[in-house]
Amino acid sequence: MDFEYLFELLCGGVVKGSIYALIALGYTMVYGIIQLINFAHGEIYMVGAFVALIITGILTLSGYSDSGLSVLVLAAVIAVIYAAAYGYTLEKIAYRPLRNAPRLSPLISAIGASIFLMNYVQLVQTPDFLPFPELVPEFEFMEPLSRFVSSVDMVILVVTALTMVALTVLIKYTKIGKAMRATQQDMVMARLVGINVDRVISATFIIGSVLAAIAGVLIASRTGQINSAIGFMAGIKAFTAAVLGGIGNIPGAVLGAMVLGIAETFGAGYISSAYEDVFAFGLLVLILILRPAGLLGKAVKQKV
Amino acid sequence: MTHVKRSLGIALWFMFLTLPLMVVRVNTVSREIEWRWHNMALVGICAFAIAWFWQFSIERRMSKLAQVSNDKHPELKKPTWTQRLAADPVLSRRVLIAVGALAMVFPWLVSTGQNFYHVNVMVSALIFVVLGLGLNITVGLAGLLDLGYIAFFAVGAYTYALLAKTFGMGFWTCLPLGGLMGALFGVVLGFPILRLRGDYLAIVTLGFASITKIVLENWDTVFGGAAGIANIPRPDFFGVELTGREKAVYTYYIVLGLVALAVLVTTRLKNSRIGRAWMALREDEIACVAMGVDMARTKLSAYALGAFWAGLVGVVFAAHNNFINPDSFTFMDSAMILAMVVLGGMGSILGVIIAALALKLMPEYLRAFAEYRMLVFGAVMVLMMIFRPQGLINDMRRKYEYDTAEREDDDGGK
Amino acid sequence: MAANDERKKLLEVSGLTMDFGGLRAVDNVGLDIYEGEIVALIGPNGAGKTTFFNCVTGIYEPTRGDVKMLPPGRPARRINGMKPNRITELGMARTFQNIRLFPAMTVLENVMIGRHCRTSTSIVDAIFGGRKAAAEERESIDKSYQLLKKVGLAEVADEFSRNLSYGAQRRLEIARALATDPFLLLLDEPAAGMNPQETHELDALITRIRAEEKVAILLIEHDMKLVMNISDRIYVMEYGKEIAQGTPQQIKENPKVIEAYLGEEAHA
Ligand SMILES: Nc1ncnc2c1ncn2[C@@H]1O[C@H](COP(=O)(O)OP(=O)(O)O)[C@@H](O)[C@H]1O
Ligand SMILES: [Mg+2]
């Protein structure tokens, strides 16, 4: 057995899992509160990547000459702001009017929103792949690790870890975080004790979108190219990760994303890269059949 | 006045939202930035108008809802034209005959000599009508959101392509086989996943369709890979060799026949014990099983029957196009069929037919529309759910005939 | 009580327990129903009455205990963990506390769903529309219509069920349950949301149903007047446990019940 190859795959899987985790959190938080698969979440991630691309383009072409990293950070900040704005608007238009509609209505609306956003970006920008500039400088870090992990990957891992910590703090200790947890437990009760549920839902969309945009910028710097369709697959994969971990469960989403990322890279590395997506979907189908509540989720019985 | 103020705010918000994506375009090759400020003005004006209209519509909808809950007899509302049509059997039969006659002579009206473009377009549209009717069973009647419906279409198409090319089997033998293969795939896939909740089912069907496409793309020894399969025989006509135009017209009649068959079968089922069980399942799963309906069997039948139509018409598609590859079976195609069902009104046969024809023919004849097609579909799906979840055409409930004479007896006896 | 023992037993529940995670919603409850009886299950909100119904009708699989059905003229069956539709086929039907009709179907169609398990038209029959299928359809319609007449909804047979008033919806649920030809009918708070006049009519309806449809009835109800009026026997639950059972008179005088349940009202 070739351990070096195995370790390389493992690192690749964890990096991939980190990206999935950032997107999956948005799915899981929204689902936890309003039981909706926000099908358009992948598109928010794509919009984030596109805004970052445009900002970096403006900055570099207009002669803003600073280090690549500062350009990237500035672009990421603006991308995050825009993604948050898109997520907020999406909820207001496509989901809020359907709060009490039959259960399939918001899902169909979400699919419509996803198709709309994908084609909107395609029409106003381009259907082709656009190159994303390499902005992460090569830097030195611990010797044995640097053989398996590139600088970009290292940035991805560090940023993901920091984001997770920030999210945990936000949910555990802030007022809005507590309100979110209360609303997730029981929306009616939360409303009765004076929580502004609408605001909590908006906040959830905004936080999820911020995470997705971070993922979008990171993946764009890693793959070096983006197009308007990247959100679709990433979205479905991330949803798979969320289900795998137990939808509605935040640590579950991260765990599920890691499992999915690793499973995919191993499947691609040892079997065939053409069937990478098949492994992901196969895993989704298996988990739903064998353990629909997911790895960390608890089975709840619907109240009758 | 508050409306104007709010609309202004909304317009500004959308100008901000679309600022980077619609105004700036970075050309990394020529290293130029294109600024399209006129787009921003456009967004501002449109957003203002739409926001104003939106608030107006929401307000109207709210007052309507309030009215309905106050009103004990909302059925006294003015009947829509479809309701009036359905209520008048003579008129509806006449309309039906007229439409049928028009459909029969259509190919002769629009095609001459070598020009049969319109017939071909219509064949493609009618194929989607059958797909819409099939998905209408699964989604519209039984409420099982299937986002991978196109996979069954692919199953039918590849079934025919492979059987015809490797075993030289004829179109008419393969037609039912394609349908059965679709249904078989429906059952095999449906069996393990039908216990899933509605939204999970949607994602799994989507995954299934993606897997199907990946397999078709990569298993090139059997399915021809991304290049697909070419030179698929056209429908045979008792061994007679047909010209190009005759072939198109012949296919037209075949698919028209399938549409008629699909309409007949769906209507029959809808007004039967089976169709009622489907609808009950859609309305409330728990109540439905508590009333003695076998959920697994009912779901599976709806799923398999929907898949059957896709498989059947997939055969026609392969024969008509002469050539198939995985690109005809993408998620966007599934989404478009779903849009037909949603737009037509979940469960409404007439609505689905009209929506399918409209969605398929509009981009064909309005080239300007073709570019914005998917954008419009997406928007339409959102707007329909918000403003007209019942679709453009209301699904009318059948009124049953019952013995009222007996009632008087009964009352007299008491 | 002695008379009951000579009658045929229809349902025998013993040691029924249902846990939701850490919460024990039903704790070791036993209950019997005999032919021709109207039995009430009462107790404060959250006592576990609805959960008891759900366990008995197969919506939930009970954590522990036995549910036995004894269909007249057929062998007894243990029905724990059986699917709800199988239990309905065996002859037990129910209504729901939070009305669960099929809103976009007509009133008549709602009842016709109840006939589903008593009819057998297959997909093929339905497509080809043979004489047998037509006859069965006819019979379904007529039978359902008769039931609508019985509950006083014949006039609105072609309405969408979502357009009915609250009380009418509750009666429609009863008709729908009766359409499954049950020998045992479970009603979950049938008078909830009804005005006094409607409640009074419901009282008459339930007694009439027992007589005409030959069903035994188990009902959950908070309206004490209704319960005391029509029940032969009463079971009382509190915090998942069964705290008393007996005739209405015995229950009225049971200090435990007065303490737990009637007490609040007596003081009010
Ligand atoms: N599906 C469920 N999951 C978790 N807890 C439940 C569920 N159904 C009921 N419960 C709990 O079980 C207890 C009994 O509820 P219920 O049977 O509805 O009471 P009742 O009908 O007597 O008012 C309540 O505390 C309720 O919250
Ligand atoms: Mg209850």
Image (cartoon, coloured by chain):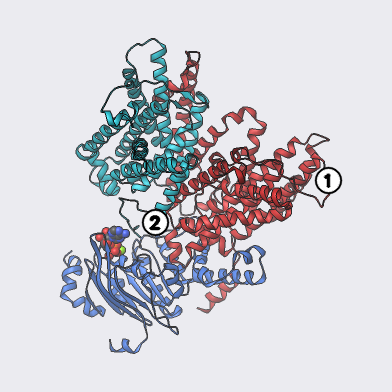
Chain colours: A cyan, B red, C blue
Tag 2: residue type?
A: Leu
> For the residue labelled by badge 2, is the local secondary structure a helix, a strand or a loop?
helix
Name the subunit of mark 1.
Answer: B
> For the residue labelled by badge 1, is the local secondary structure a helix, a strand or a loop?
loop
Q: Quadrant of residue A47?
A: top left
Spot the residue most to the front. A1
| Label 2 sits on residue | A290
Pick the front one: C24 or B7: C24
Name the subunit of mark 2.
Answer: A
| Label 1 sits on residue | B241
Mark 2, ligand 1, within 8 Å: the answer is no
Q: Quadrant of ligand 1?
A: bottom left
Residue A29 at x, y = what percent?
A: 32, 42
Query: Would you say B206 lies left or right of B348 here?
Result: left
Residue C36 at x, y = what percent?
A: 38, 82
Q: Quadrant of residue B325?
A: top right
**Residue A89 tag number:** none
Residue B227 at x, y = what percent?
A: 62, 37
Tag 1: residue type?
A: Glu
Q: Residues within 10 Å of mark 1 (few under 14, many from 20)?
A: few
**Could you confirm whether marks 1 and 2 are on the same chain?**
no
